[in-house]
């Protein structure tokens, strides 16, 4: 159990109060006039010091008041240290202002962690760390030495802010935020809790003018790009951090890095470097620890959190991460390379829909993700969706289209052949009546299917209003179609002629819903929109499949990537792709023959106009045709 968890069980302490009656009355009056507005983390104005809340204290002068004995002149002239005196000395960094402090505390049986020396939990140590000058403040080590000599070190060094805005922030947090590796090491060496959590309002996500960094000291060092402090906290002989420690949101250090990423180039660069650094360092210190598999309170691992929050650049890096030395940490393994073309194996763990709450489901159904289409174009998600569609989804989709078309014709025929007169109608033992009844039963079964499917989808996806407008409106139209039919059926059996109006609306909407099947072709609308709709359709079809069939149709293959060392069994997906950016060769010209004829090679942008092998073959075919034409022209000139 960490110290932060033990801190809730604090033994009772009795403090000594040596203030005069006049000083106590003044403090009481200050508490009455205290503002309810947010109090600053630090201030140079002594009037911003908050008077201590009422405590059970021992009156140092009580016996003299009873015996009516006045204080001796020597004691009257002796220096007293108030919170204002300590804060002024800590702010200025002058040790001379603290001379005699230890003797005073020992004589009066007082401590630096007493409530009289705190302002909303802020001690003189916190005040000194907030007022570093060129990274130094001589009073810090001096105060720590005094606290150690009077047996008050642990309580003093781990004192934290108590107001709701900065609650939980300790001296270690401030030292890390001030980027002082010297004081971080000093505090940890002397017993600062490395798992303490700054959980005040200022340190929470989704708040204006706040800074969420994961609450823990390690997360703060990582999110402020301090690899030296990160290394020290992870590996030191005093108190190494527990990498699995989570904050109040269930986030550990990798989750915190995902949260602070913002897709800008500078931010992404340092977040990626720090993410990889912590991952490799953790693998060295704890080889069996799988840090990326830790979930937060929402059930999201770091890669899933990156997908859900639209951290595109970081997400792409995690998915396509390839380490040459730490191969077991790679999610991408290059099998072979030929020019710009390579074949890669991608780790499908957390990505494929075979697992619950997969990355693919998060991205496809995440209508609130602003760059969802860009994320779907990242490999292996792009090829994975394409493979699922071509392998089974398109055939099931086409079968559904045929079935719905037959259903529409039956429904239309039943509606056209409806009997006149007051409902409900009687059926005679005639062939036409049996056919009509059969058509009505088929129509009712279809409506019931659409109704149940709509309910199940709403429970499973729990869509927001935005999702209904962008992704789910077609499903809702089928659901509305079923509702109209059910209302029509109820009115029919109640003998109401109004059932015809609902029948007409239901039939019209049924034909409109035929447009749903246009998503089977990505050329039947805006390309990006059709790709999104096809992805949603693919996952919807896959979800309906029974477990045994899902297992049989699962994408990828199980491979051992251990290279003869320890077994590294993973479910991988092979992707053949071209990457001109990483193939740093100059292919601008090709010189051949004595005449030094310059032949133009297609640029990478031209090759990327047609994705996949088709584009490469087409471009190189065009290049070969131009080459043969120029060669024939050269031969004709030579012969002439």
Image: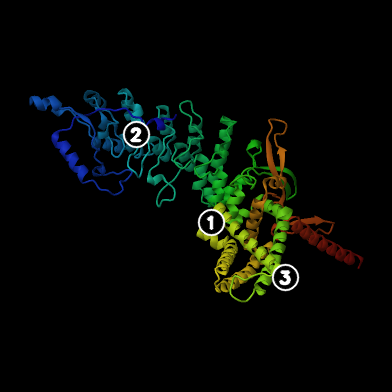
Q: Nearer the viewer, mark 3 or mark 1?
A: 3
As helix, strand or loop, the secondary structure at mark 2 comes to loop
Nearest to the observer: residue 100 or residue 292: 292
Name the residue carrying label 3.
430
**Are there few (<14), some (14-19), or many (20+) residues within 10 Å of tag 3?**
few
- The vertical placement of 68 against 449, above or below, is above
Q: Is residue 566 visible?
A: yes
As helix, strand or loop, the secondary structure at mark 1 comes to loop
The reply, left or right, for residue 594 in relation to residue 395 is right
Q: Position of residue 367 (x, y in %)?
A: 55, 57
Mark before the other along the chain sequence, 2 or 1: 2
Residue located at (63% from left, 59% from top): 449
Look at the image and tell me in which quarter the C terminus lies.
bottom right
Q: Residue furthest bottom?
A: 420
Q: Quote the CA–CA distance across marks 2 and 1.
A: 45 Å
Quadrant hosting residue 135: top left
Q: Which mark is residue 463?
A: 1
Q: Quote the CA–CA distance across marks 2 and 3.
A: 91 Å
Mark before the other along the chain sequence, 2 or 3: 2
Q: Position of residue 128 (x, y in %)?
A: 33, 36
Quadrant hosting residue 548: top right
Q: Are marks 3 and 1 in contact (CB under 8 Å)?
A: no
As helix, strand or loop, the secondary structure at mark 3 comes to loop
Q: Position of residue 5 (x, y in %)?
A: 41, 32
Q: Quote the CA–CA distance across marks 3 and 1.
A: 48 Å
Q: Which mark is residue 159?
A: 2
Q: Position of residue 417 (x, y in %)?
A: 67, 74
């Amino acid at each position: 159990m960490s110290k932060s968890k033990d801190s809730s069980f604090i033994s009772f302490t009795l403090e000594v109060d040596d203030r005069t009656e006049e000083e106590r009355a003044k403090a009481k009056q200050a508490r009455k006039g205290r503002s309810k507005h947010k109090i600053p983390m630090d201030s140079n104005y002594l009037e911003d010091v908050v008077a201590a809340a009422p405590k059970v204290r021992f009156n140092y002068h009580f016996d003299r008041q009873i015996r009516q004995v006045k204080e001796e002149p020597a004691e009257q002239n002796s220096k007293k240290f108030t919170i204002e005196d300590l804060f002024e000395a800590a702010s200025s960094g002058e040790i001379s202002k603290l001379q005699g402090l230890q003797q005073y505390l020992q004589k009066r049986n007082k401590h630096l962690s007493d409530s009289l020396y705190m302002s909303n939990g802020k001690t003189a140590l916190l005040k000194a760390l907030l007022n570093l000058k060129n990274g130094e403040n001589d009073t810090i080590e001096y105060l720590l030495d005094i606290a150690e000599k009077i047996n008050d070190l642990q309580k003093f060094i781990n004192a934290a802010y108590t107001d709701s805005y900065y609650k939980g922030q300790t001296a270690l947090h401030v030292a890390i935020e001030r980027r002082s590796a010297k004081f971080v090491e000093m505090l940890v060496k002397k017993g600062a809790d490395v798992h303490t959590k700054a959980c005040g309002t200022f340190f929470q996500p989704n708040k204006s003018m706040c800074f969420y960094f994961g609450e823990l000291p390690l997360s703060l060092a990582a999110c402020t790009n301090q690899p030296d402090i990160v290394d020290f906290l992870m590996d030191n002989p005093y108190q190494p951090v527990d990498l699995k420690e989570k904050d109040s949101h269930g986030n550990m250090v990798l989750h915190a890095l995902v949260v602070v990423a913002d897709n800008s180039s500078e931010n992404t660069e340092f977040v990626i470097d720090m993410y990889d650094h912590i991952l490799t360092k953790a693998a060295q210190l704890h080889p069996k620890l799988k840090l990326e598999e830790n979930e937060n309170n929402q059930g999201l691992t770091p890669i899933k959190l990156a997908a859900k929050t639209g951290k595109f650049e970081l997400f792409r890096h995690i998915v396509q991460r390839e380490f040459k030395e730490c191969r077991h940490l790679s999610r991408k393994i290059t099998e072979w390379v030929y020019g710009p073309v390579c074949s890669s194996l991608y780790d499908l763990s957390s990505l494929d829909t075979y697992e619950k709450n997969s990355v693919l489901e998060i991205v496809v159904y995440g209508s609130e993700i602003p760059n969802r289409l860009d994320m779907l174009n990242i490999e292996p998600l792009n090829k994975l969706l394409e493979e699922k569609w071509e392998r089974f989804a398109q055939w099931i989709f086409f079968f559904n289209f045929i079935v719905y078309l037959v259903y529409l014709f039956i429904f239309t025929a039943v509606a056209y052949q409806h009997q006149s007169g007051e409902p409900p109608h009687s059926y005679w033992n005639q062939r036409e009546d049996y056919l009509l009844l059969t058509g009505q039963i088929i129509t009712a079964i279809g409506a019931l299917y659409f109704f149940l499917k709509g309910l199940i989808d709403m429970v499973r996806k729990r869509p927001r209003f935005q999702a209904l407008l962008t992704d789910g409106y077609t499903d809702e139209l089928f659901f509305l179609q079923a509702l109209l039919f059910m209302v029509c059926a109820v009115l029919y059996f109640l003998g109401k002629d109004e059932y015809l109006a609902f029948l007409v609306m239901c039939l019209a909407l049924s034909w409109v819903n035929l447009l749903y099947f246009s998503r089977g072709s990505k050329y039947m609308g805006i390309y990006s929109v059709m790709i999104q709709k096809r992805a949603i359709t693919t996952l919807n079809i896959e979800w309906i499949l029974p477990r045994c069939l899902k297992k049989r149709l699962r994408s990828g293959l199980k491979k051992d990537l251990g290279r003869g060392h320890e077994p590294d069994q993973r479910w991988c997906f092979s992707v053949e792709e071209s990457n001109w950016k990483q193939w740093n060769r100059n292919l601008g010209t090709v010189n051949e023959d004595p005449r030094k004829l310059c032949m133009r090679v297609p640029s990478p942008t031209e090759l990327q106009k047609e994705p996949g092998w088709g584009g490469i073959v087409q471009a190189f075919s065009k290049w070969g045709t131009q080459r043969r034409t120029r060669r024939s022209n050269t031969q004709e000139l030579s012969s002439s």
